[in-house]
Amino acid sequence: MLATIRATSSSREIPVLMLTARREEPDRIRGLTLGADDYLTKPFSTLELVLRVGAILRRARSAATSSDTVSVGPLEIDRARHRVTVSGQAIDLTATEFKLLLTLALRRGRLQSRAQLLEDVWDAAPDVQTRTVDMHVQRLRAKLGPELELIETIRGFGYRLRAVNGSL
């Protein structure tokens, strides 16, 4: 069963904790070799189970956010190479535009206030009143070309990168 889960691309990254009565070392080794993220034998305490699940979820979240490539529809952001492509065509962004787009992409589908973006992208105090965010979003939209509608303006609040079907 575990081998089937790990062989399927849609379920390959799902964290697996084996809960079993099989305590012998060869059983534990086999379970971990097959792809389990952790192995817990009965009897176990509820606290230990909660802590192990928490550790597995932290590792899974860390692995998901440290991926080198973030894709949103035709938009692909390669963090390692500091490169952005739209439908396979590279677009040239400043460091700030790259950081702004990456921040919106990592939080796609969720509203980002101007204050949040000022704090996260520019390391500015959130109470600073400035049109910097608006100007950078306008420049970013111009560079994205036909995909400029990916960045939505939520009037009076901020911006959101639209979640596109098929993107996480």
Image (spheres, rainbow, N blue to C red):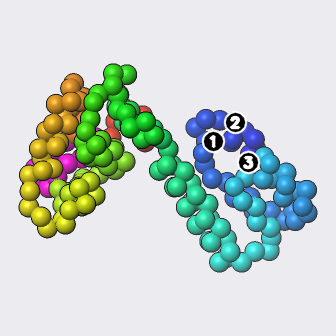
At a point 71% along the width and 78% down the height, the residue shown is 45
Q: Give the residue type at disc 2.
A: Ala
Q: Which mark is residue 12?
A: 1
At a point 73% along the width and 48% down the height, the residue shown is 35
Span shown in magenta: 152-162
Q: Which is more N-terminal, label 2 or label 1?
A: 2
Q: Give the residue type at disc 1.
A: Arg
Q: Residue 159 colored magenta?
A: yes
**Quarter of image, res 166:** top left
Q: CA distance from mark 1 to mark 3?
A: 9 Å
- Residue 167 in view of the camera: no
At a point 16% along the width and 31% down the height, the residue shown is 142
Tag 1 near tag 3, CB within 8 Å:
no
Q: Which residue is mark 2?
A: 7
Tag 1 near tag 2, CB within 8 Å:
yes
- Disc 3 crowd rating (10 Å Cα; few below 14, some 14-19, many 20+) is some
From the viewer's side, name the closer residue of 115 and 32: 115
Q: Which residue is mark 3?
A: 35
